[in-house]
Amino acid sequence: MATRAGLMRQLMKGGFPKRTEIKPANREAAKKTNWNILRGDTVQVIDRKHPEFGKQGIVKVVDRKRDRVIVEGLNTSPKHLKPDPDRGLAGRTIVTERSIHYSNVNLVDPVTGLPTRIARKILEDGTKVRVAKKSGAIIPRPEILSQRRKPKSATVTSSDTADIDAVWEVSYVPKPDIIMKEA
């Protein structure tokens, strides 16, 4: 039986062990290996109970660990930000997109404009493509995937080599006594 004193002693020692149990939804998401919906795809909400049912949008983020997607302009809700008087920021409310479960959206067929399921095929030249089940049209990979989500830093510092010819210049000369010991 846990008493108040016993609980306090346990907390003073370093707290209670944290739960390491993985949620069942996340366990199912970890089993998945093929993802048909990619960042930049146009999707439509197919869940009839969802308030955004029938609306289409472009996928901004695919969260593979939680099996969810964030669609631009859909499933929005207000988010209240606290004021920060030290930095001179007032409290405000912004509207953000919340995630939708992966199973509640389908890719939009480029030919018909309706939601469709996906099949995968390998073309004669060996490239893997996504094919719409309804029309049989090939769904191309979005162009946005060729760009980096976080651009590489282009800042030049003093430690960077400015001159191209200086890159090939030998700057390390080993001492002669080290060479004699190795031989």
Image (cartoon, rainbow, N blue to C red):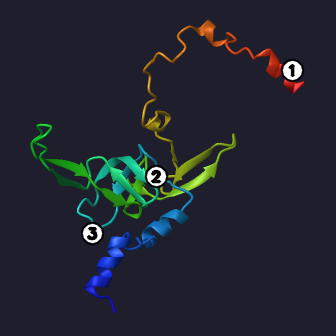
Q: Amino acid under label 1?
A: Met
Looking at this rendering, what residue extends furthest in the bottom direction? Answer: 1
Query: Can residue 23 be seen in this snapshot?
Result: yes
Viewer-side residue, 35 vs 44: 35
Residue hosting label 3: 49
Instruction: Name the quadrant of the C terminus.
Output: top right
N-term-proximal mark, 3 vs 2: 2
Residue hosting label 1: 180
Viewer-side residue, 143 vs 79: 79
Q: Residue at x 62, y 8 (%)?
A: 166
SS for callout 3? loop
Residue hosting label 2: 37
Q: Amino acid under label 2?
A: Ile
SS for callout 1? helix
Query: Can residue 108 be seen in this snapshot?
Result: no
N-term-proximal mark, 1 vs 2: 2
Callouts 1 and 2 close, C-beta under 8 Å: no
Q: Answer above or below: position of 30 versus 176.
A: below
Q: Residue at x 49, y 34 (%)?
A: 146
CA neighbours of label 1 inside 10 A, class few (<14), some (14 to 19), many (20+): few
Looking at this rendering, what residue extends furthest in the right direction? Answer: 183
N-term-proximal mark, 3 vs 1: 3
Q: Answer above or below: position of 88 versus 7.
A: above
Nearer the observer, disc 3 or disc 1?
A: 1
Q: What numbered label is drawn on residue 153?
A: none
**Which image quadrant is residue 25 in?**
bottom left
Q: Position of residue 64 (x, y in %)?
A: 46, 56
Q: Position of residue 92 (x, y in %)?
A: 11, 46
Q: Position of residue 169 (x, y in %)?
A: 67, 9
